[in-house]
Structures are given as structure tokens and as C-alpha cells.
Image (cartoon, grey):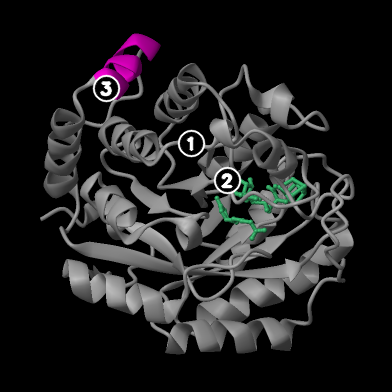
Amino acid sequence: MTVRTDWTREEIAALFDLPFADLMYEAQTVHRARHPRNEVQLSTLLSIKTGGCPEDCGYCSQSTQADSGLKATKLMDVQAVLQAAAQAKDHGSGRFCMGAAWRSPKDRDMPRIIEMVKGVRQMGMETCMTLGMLSEGQARQLAEAGLDYYNHNIDTSPENYANVITTRSFEDRIETLENVRAAGINVCCGGIVGMGETRADRIGFIHALATMPHPESVPINALVPVKGTVLGDMLADTPMAKIDETEFVRTVAVARIAMPASMVRLSAGRESMSEACQALCFMAGANSIFTGDRLLTAPNAGDDSDARLFAKLGVVAMEAAPHGHLEAAE
Ligand code: SAM
Ligand code: DTB
Ligand code: SF4
């Protein structure tokens, strides 16, 4: 149960191949050794700049390449962002994650972004941002502002990357992750399953995450199929390509075992997931979710249904503890 970054693909593949009950048992054992059981960390998303993105990510409604009918907006005012953060805090969320549909932030945007980080932090919430690629200098500026986490996903295996996104490379992603880490900001990095990728791609995806310095937070998103995006339309045309729930749970369990100390977030896609599947994901070691009615642009499960689910499962919200969760073993 030590934290290892020397995983081989064969080892990751062997975990995926385990009988389901054995995989769940191992994942739950690792989880209990490292994390408070029955506790789930709550984060809330806000899209601070929506749509009009020049990147061509095949899953995303915010790309200019997508015909999703989404209205593009300008960067929000600081006050409006702080108001949304206050509401999230009132609803029990510990972390506020601000996302912008950018390839990378412009230097002229940085002062406002920094005000947002400082303001949310002053409210006693953990801060997270996802703004696209960052230079070393931008990462340092965000660190100085007190940013706790930066989300930047590798999304899929290195070999599948170009099938999903062509306007940047897997290596570009790694470079930003290195800049973020070097600046001393916690890394939030994961990806999407259910994009029609193969088991081998899911193995390559977890292998890539587990052989870098492990991200403190690993979001596992189930593709939210959006009409007008390449992948949303592909799934609508070939429903057979939709990922099966057991395979989704397996992916969560393998992430938990391969990255024992990380927080594994059951991210996008919960809205259309059964309660039983979500319960299995928690069993498999997921210990974080996005709360609230909306993700960035897509609908989310919502506070009422989450409260019901938590009560049913005997799950409680984890106390927010900036930078402290890795020591949270029982
Ligand atoms: N533009 C920035 C970037 O790409 O890094 C930040 C925002 S982007 C929307 C953040 C992440 O959301 C993506 O990396 C992807 O993993 C996830 N995402 C976007 N659209 C999704 C969808 N339809 N279903 C599931 N996950 C999605
Ligand atoms: C992540 O891995 N998932 C979040 C967050 N990081 C920024 C975003 C999910 C987006 C889902 C689609 C939407 O809302 O547009
Ligand atoms: Fe732009 Fe991010 Fe959407 Fe890609 S995922 S199109 S970079 S907003």
C-alpha cells in the first residue's frame, strides 16, 4: 500500500482483470488504510468564462468547433464569483473550483483571476482553478495568490490523445502539470472514460497518472454526451460504444489502488448514473464529488439528491483541510 510511481502497464492491466469482488475488496482495503472511511470531500464548480474556446476537445460543448448552441460569455466579475462561492459554502462545499474555456490565460486576465483566488480563500474555502495551459510565471503568480489546486486533465491514454484533441499534445499537458507542481500548487489531474476508448486506453490513462508524481486529486469523469460535439454525436449514433457501469467502477477502483494517497473524485456524469453505481464507486474508493446543480455547463446531480444518497449510504461530507488531506489516514 506504499505510494509507488513505478507501476507497469501489465500490473495495471492485471488489476483491471481481477474478478470484480476481488478488485473491490482490494480497493476498499487500500482506501481504509489511507483515508477516513465513509467521508466524501465536496467541491463546487463555477464556469467563470464560458464557451468560445479555440481548442477542439471532442467531448466539450465549449469548443468553437462544437455545434452545441452554448452562448459564449466574457470573464465574470470578481464580485459575482465571490457571491457564487458564498452560496457554495452555505451549501456545505469545502472547495470552489473556477473553470475558464481558454487554451491558456492571457496575462491581462491574471489580475482579476488573482483577485478571485484571494477572495475565495478569504472566505475560508479551498480554491481550485482550471484555465488551460499555464506558463511557469503564471503558475508562480497563482501560487503567490494562494491557489490551493490547479485542475489540468490528461483526459485519456497518451496514444489515444490525438483521437480526442488535436490542437495541443499530451506533452503540452505534462508541461503545464510540471509548472503547476514546481510552483507548489496541488495538482488535480484525471480524465474522462466512456469516450469510446478501449480497455487498453483506460489502462494507459491510469498508468500515465500513476507513474507521474501522483496528483493530490484525481477526477474520473464519465463522458457527458453533448449534442453537437464530436463525441456526443458519436455516442448518439453508436449507443453500443457507451461504457458499461461495471467497467466504469473498475476504472475508479484501479485508480484508487494505483494512487492510494490521492483523492479520487467521482466527477462528471453522476447525473445520469444510478445510485447503485455511485455507491459502488464509493466502495471502489472514490472519496470526492462535485456538488450543486451544475458542473461547468452541464447539469449535475444536485444537492437534494446527494443529501438523500449520502443519508442512504451513511456517507458524510469531509471537513475541508487545505493541504492536509494526505495526512488524513485513520
Ligand atoms: N479549458 C480548460 C482545460 O481544458 O484544461 C479547463 C476547463 S475543461 C472543461 C476541464 C475538464 O472538464 C476537461 O479536461 C475534461 O476532462 C472535462 N470535461 C469537459 N467536458 C466534458 C464532458 N462533456 N464530459 C465529461 N468531462 C468533460
Ligand atoms: C474535471 O475533471 N471535471 C470538471 C472539472 N474538472 C473542471 C468539469 C466537468 C465538465 C463537465 C461538462 C460541462 O459541465 O460542461
Ligand atoms: Fe476548451 Fe477546456 Fe473545452 Fe477543451 S475542455 S474545448 S480546452 S474548455
Q: Can residue 196 be seen?
A: yes
Residue 272: percent from left, percent from top: 49, 58
Mark 2 residue element: loop
Would you call the spot at circle 1 few (<14 residues within 10 Å), some (14-19), or many (20 or more)?
some
Image: 30 above or below 86: above
Q: Amino acid at mark 3?
A: Leu
Find the magenta span and give its range.
9-17
Tell whether label 1 touches label 2 (CB within 8 Å). yes
Q: Please name which of the two marks, 3 or 1, marks the residue nearer to the observer.
A: 1
Image quadrant for the C terminus? bottom left
Residue 314: percent from left, percent from top: 16, 70
The tag earlier along the polypeptide, 2 or 3, is 3
Q: Which mark is residue 15?
A: 3
Residue placed most toward the observer, 90 or 249: 249
The tag earlier along the polypeptide, 3 or 1, is 3
Q: Can residue 323 be seen?
A: no
Q: Which residue position is annotated with label 1?
A: 243
Mark 3 residue element: helix
Image: 57 above or below 121: above
Image: 35 above or below 190: below
Determine the CA span between mark 3 and mark 1. 18 Å
